[in-house]
Image (tube, grey):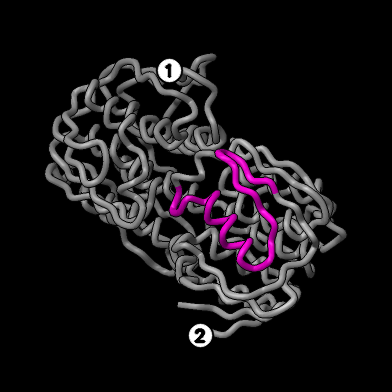
Amino acid sequence: MNIKITSSPLYGVIRAIPSKSDAHRALICASLCHEPTQIVMSGELSEDISATINCLRSLGAEIIEDSGGVTVHPVGGRTNHSAALDCAESGSTLRFMLPVAAVLGGSFTVTGRGRLPQRPVDTLAALLNSHGCTVTGNALPLRCDGKLTGGSFPLEGNVSSQYVSGLLFALPLLDTDSEIRLLSALESSAYADMTVNTLARFGVEVTKTAGGFYVKGNQTYRSPGAYEVEGDWSNTAFWLCAAAIGGKISCAGLNMRSSQPDREIVNILKRTGASALETSDGLTVTCGKLQPFDMDASQCPDLVPAAAVLMTAARGRSLIKNAGRLRLKESDRLSAVTSALNAVGANIRERADSLEIDGTGRLTGGTTDSFGDHRIAMALAVASLACESELTVTNAQAVTKSYPAFFEDFKLLGGKFDVV
């Protein structure tokens, strides 16, 4: 699907969609309980969340969808010991489900599509191999046999916080205590904190230590009955940046004290000169004269596409640093951001793990590609607000990976586009 967008400021009120990061975690915890859990989250399920649901169903959980969310009947005694886990294009699903399936035991296969087979999982596979499992393959497709055992799990902190979260789901179910020993500072550490917080809501205790995490064995997941998924800061960031470039948008349904790392967008907006005011239920952003700024992406890498658009709309030189892991996302995001925005008039220089952006305040418009990446597609829609002429985004259907209703909401806020 290609979308031709006519530049127009965005105004109005939008409600944040349910957080993909929070939903993944809640669904997994609910499936490991002994009692059912109602997961409250409105709207159409994204492709990534559907991937996690399908994997949990393959393991034996019964998950019933309705207009208000899903009801999870846990795996319990229905464990499928020869499960086929299709992770689609979801990196979170892959890295969370590997340890979870391994702790349940038996044999299972894991597959995926798109760029997922190219995304690293060898470090996690090696840890499983050293703790009771036999993993065949270092990338998808792979097969795992055996049952996870406890002990010490050493991990470099710059690999992926998703490895840590996946282990944190599994380790409480082991017969023995375990530790995750971080060999360097953990990047995107707030995502691990999210996991610890979700586990606590399901009655599971994790102790943060000076060198990682300590997890007691023989714990029991306990259902809270109902679990309401937080509003999503990652996807809402695109509306907040759009308002900063041109318009005024109030985003409701946001937890201002959330542990989601992409809440950092509030500080970014303030540094760039936009007005960002807290409301009783979220945030209101109004456009202003944008200033260049520097950004350390090590703890909030998903904000880079939106932040890069902000930088092109500011006058002056900005820098995004510590962003090398973005090369292993749904696209090589450093390359994709550079190519996609330069094609419509930006001036971005790509480095090994950084982007240098000379913003002029305006973009020319034209035709550019999403590279099949949902965050690039949404960033380009936001970039249209700074364009002097129409902007056509090819492969715009990529938004369905995390935000199926994105262009409906874009139109609701006054966005003007045609499907071509």
Q: Is residue 281 visible?
A: no
**Marks 1/2: CA distance?**
52 Å
Q: Closer to the camera, 299 or 78? A: 299
The residue drawn where x is 74% and y is 56% is: 283
Which quadrant of the structure image shows residue 355? top right
**Quadrant containing the N terminus in the rendered view:** bottom left
- Residue name at image x 53 percent, y 39 percent: 324
Residue 334 magenta: yes
How crowded is the residue under tag 2: few (<14 C-alpha within 10 Å), some, or many (20+)?
A: few
The relative height of residue 146 versus residue 249 in the rendered view (above or below) is above
Q: Is residue 17 left or right of residue 27?
A: right
Q: Is residue 198 left or right of residue 57?
A: right
Q: Amino acid at mark 2?
A: Val
- Is residue 380 shown in magenta? no
Q: Nearer the viewer, residue 122 or 239?
A: 122
Is 210 displayed left or right of 331 in the figure? right
The reply to whether callout 1 and callout 2 are in contact (CB within 8 Å) is no
Circle 1 sits on which residue? Answer: 181
Relative image position of residue 346 (x, y in whole percent): 69, 61
For disc 2, the marked residue is 420
Residue beneath the point at 62% across and 40% down: 297
In the image, is residue 180 above or below residue 263? above
Stretch of the chain drawn in magenta: 329-356
Would you say 99 lies left or right of 212 here? Answer: left
Which badge, 1 or 2, comes first in the chain's sequence? 1
Tell me what residue is drawn at x 20 percent, y 42 percent: 142
Please identify, in this view, whether the residue under mark 1 or under mark 2 is nearer the observer.
2
Q: Position of residue 304 (x, y in %)?
A: 61, 49
Q: Amino acid at mark 1?
A: Arg
